[in-house]
Amino acid sequence: MKRFSLLLIAVVAYLCSYAATYSGTLPVLYINTDNGQAITSKEDYITATAYLDALGLDGYESVGSVDAPLVLQIKGRGNWTWVGFDKKPYRLKFDSKQAFMGMKKSKHFALMAAADDTDGFLRNPVGYYMSDLAGLPWAPSQRPVEVVLNGEYIGLYFLTETIRVDKDRVNIVEQPDEATDPAQITGGWLVEIDNYDTDPHVTVIEHNTDGYAIWFTYKTPEVLSPEQEEYLTNQMTLINDALYREDLNDNTWEDYVDVYSLARYYIVQEVLDDYESFHGSCYLYKDQGDGKWQFGPVWDFGNSFTEDKWRFIYQDRTWHNVWIAQACRHPHFIEVVKEVWQEIYPTLNDQLMAFVDNFSNTVSQAAVNDADRWRQYGNSDFSSDVARVKARITRAISWLNSQWGDGDPIPVGEHNAYFINTPGWEQVYVFMWYNNGNGFTETPLGGWPGTRASLREDGMWQINFDWPNLPADNVGIIFGNGGSGVEAGNQTKDFTFVEGGIYNGDGLYSGNPTIAADQAVQMRINGRQVTLTGAESTTVTIADMLGRTRTIALTANTPATLTLPAGLYLINGRKLSIR
């Protein structure tokens, strides 16, 4: 009986795992392969039919129908996303050009599964929109759809324009395969800096990297003559050699690369903190003639939004990023980056926040159904994932503006806590939690160990975040080094979160900005200058967050002005932030 019960439970669980269905809030793409054949290959297309059912939703139109479906070829696509997940991505090639949900007509689309996107399905959508804001000529459009494959609901997908030479995509001359004419082979190139060497490519060894091989996979043309292979190899070698010249004021490399396109492309990657962006899926193209290589279009933001912004994408990250670290050593390139940044910065945060809100509202219910279908992937706590992404975008823009802008960061998250690193950890993570009253535990900074804090100029670590309806009390907070265990020295004990609180390894150092405040001393702040005036002659103690103090003697009603470095201070018990 016991074995039967266990078997019954297993069967019920299996059936329930496939009981999910589409939400009815997005169009549904129905795909049926010939004879229900499984899609098992990335190399070989199989024949299928499809139609898009708009379900009568406002703003959408059906394409094809159950009685008159579209004919297409379908196969798998992707690298890690194809082999690492049961929710598979696909490549579609229709027999005739189709226009889906406002996108330009084409035969060629991808169905992106986003199985690895635990950030509210926002990585690619934000990246493509950010590309538009940065002024790159074209980025793939995509539309969220729910997919039923051979009668089975397979979740929330994104019907996406693929990168290809086309007047509506990468608008350059299409160079023919195996061309030999010297004038013809100067352009019509679409190339990817690739992190896989399985596709046809040329190789150049990057300088100053202990022999790192850059694989340039050529997408167009697809088959090279010896003349084409020589030209492409020479072009990439010229860029590589010129970029690494000893004199950083030697801008010869700009004879081959359009630095404005690189600056715009690079800024997109930094805003999303996509630290794999110059490692793979990094595209370049060149038209015929004497023109320069352009960076773009953007593609694949699979390693974005992984931390609160505190460093550039090429600084001590998991993946090697080709060329960009060296480019950022060139003063003129950074001048161009700052110029482009000043162009897009003023409205950037507002535009991205509005986009995220609109996108998340559009897919929110479908995301719930997708999480029900794929319980091992996805975004089971969708609202928390979206809130975290918004906070990290705002944080990134603020930090980048402190590097490239006027040094006056825009306001960031609503909530703050600070940590004096008395344990001496190399890095500090912050984990928070509370009970939402419905039997669920909310974790505003993500699962353990939480979110990495940012190191401030004054040596203190800060966590800054947005979280709607954060309770005023009964919120827990733990600081740690990314490991676990109080006794092992990897984390603090459980503390109570106090808004703006300053903590050390033993607990709350200073929580209330007005604790023990001397209100008889008035303060006026102008940038980094602080003017102190006392109603009576007195002394004022100024302490930074490393415990260092200085004393100022005030004469009654006589202002005293001092300049403080950026940091957080306690001045006679009042907390003061200088930026």
Image: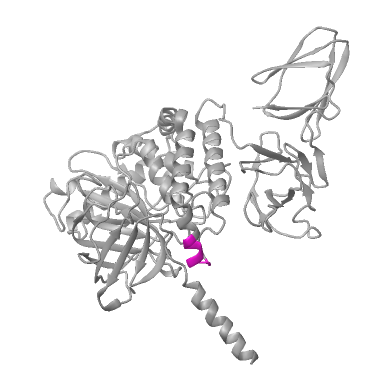
Overall secondary structure of the magenta section: helix
Residue placed most toward the observer, 170 or 497: 497
| Image quadrant where residue 527 sits | top right
Q: For this rendering, which residue is in front, 192 or 324?
A: 192
Query: In the image, 211: left or right of 61?
Result: right
Q: Is residue 204 visible?
A: no
Quadrant where the C terminus lies? top right
**Residue at point 40%, 53% (across, down):** 300
Task: Indicate whether residue 319 is drawn in magenta.
Answer: no
- Image coords of residue 509 (percent x, y): 81, 39
| In this view, 515 is above or below 101 | above
Residue 470 lies, in percent from the top left, at: 67, 44
35 vs 258, nearest the viewer = 35
| Quadrant location, the N terminus | bottom right
**Would residue 339 be found to the left or right of residue 59 on screen?**
right
Quadrant of the rendered image containing residue 539: top right
Labels in figure, total:
0
Left or right: 528 with respect to 147?
Answer: right
* Furthest residue toward left: 181
Magenta segment, which residues?
369-376
